[in-house]
Amino acid sequence: MIKKFVIKVINFLNNYVIFKKIFNQIKLIETYKKVKIHDKNLYLLDTNFVTNYRIKTFFNKEPETIDWINSFKSNTVFWDIGANVGLYSLYSQFLNKNIETIAFEPSVLNLDILVKNINKNNLEDKIFVVPNPIYKNCTFNNFSISSREKGGANSNFGEISFTRNFLMKYKTNSLNFENIMKIYGLKSPTNIKIDVDGNESEILQTLFSV
């Protein structure tokens, strides 16, 4: 009841130019949460309950992944396939090991947060972003998204062999490993994280075909 009343008041005030400008400015305010890593501050954009959850569970959601990244040797080439908002790509740059990090994230929703997180932490010259899905071949197909929330998961590229409710989709082009290295001149990865919620087998096919 209170929520409906507040919404009605906001909608009423929104009819007046001065209040509309104020509300628009409030929408533009972005809140970053601080995570302490090795006596340094990592800043992560907190826009909704999904990003908030990812920030709160940074160290305990997948502690084995954190331990694995901690084990990287100096000059590692780290491919973060399915980077989402960039938690592990960002973390890899806080280890002082001269790690070359490539973040693969095709979701336009997550890509927005990923790039903002990279820039907020002044890592735009350290993390290379590839906004294309990795697939068994280079082709145009549907990239389907199951959540309109930024930071969401369970997206899929190409043929869908499982049941999932997708809310939106768009056509885009995929890349395979051989194509990626030819086009971008990237070094072969020494460490790869794959978290793509469904296309793992296609990615592994293209990886072992190189």
Image (cartoon, grey):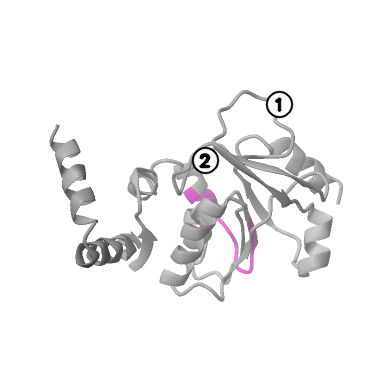
Residue occupying the point 60% across, 48% down = 82
Look at the image and tell me in which quarter the N terminus lies: top left
Q: Earlier in the sequence, mark 1 or mark 2?
A: 2
* Residue 5 visible, this orientation: yes
Q: Which residue is mark 1?
A: 161
Query: Observer-nearest residue: 149 or 194?
Result: 149
Image spot of residue 18 (x, y percent):
21, 67
From the viewer's perspective, tell me whether residue 178 is left or right of residue 17.
Answer: right
- Label 2: which secondary element: loop
- Label 1: which secondary element: loop
Residue occupying the point 42% across, 40% down = 61
From the viewer's perspective, tell me whether residue 41 is left or right of residue 92.
Answer: left
Q: Which residue is mark 2?
A: 153
Please tell me how crowded label 1 is: few (under 14), some (14-19), or many (20+) other residues with Cα within 10 Å: few
Q: Is residue 181 magenta?
A: no
Image spot of residue 31 (x, y percent):
30, 61
* Residue 94 visible, this orientation: no
Please tell me how crowded label 2 is: few (under 14), some (14-19), or many (20+) other residues with Cα within 10 Å: some
Image spot of residue 175 (x, y percent):
77, 53
From the viewer's perspective, tell me whether residue 56 is left or right of residue 132.
Answer: left
Q: Alpha carbon of mark 1 to alpha carbon of mark 2: how far?
A: 17 Å
Residue 77 occupies which quadrant of the picture? bottom right
Residue occupying the point 60% across, 36% down = 197
Q: Is residue 69 magenta?
A: yes
Query: Observer-nearest residue: 140 or 177?
Result: 140
Which region of the structure is painted magenta?
66-79
From the viewer's perspective, tell me whether residue 128 is left or right of residue 205.
Answer: left
Q: Across the whole image, how many numbered discs are drawn on residues?
A: 2
Q: Amino acid at mark 1?
A: Ser
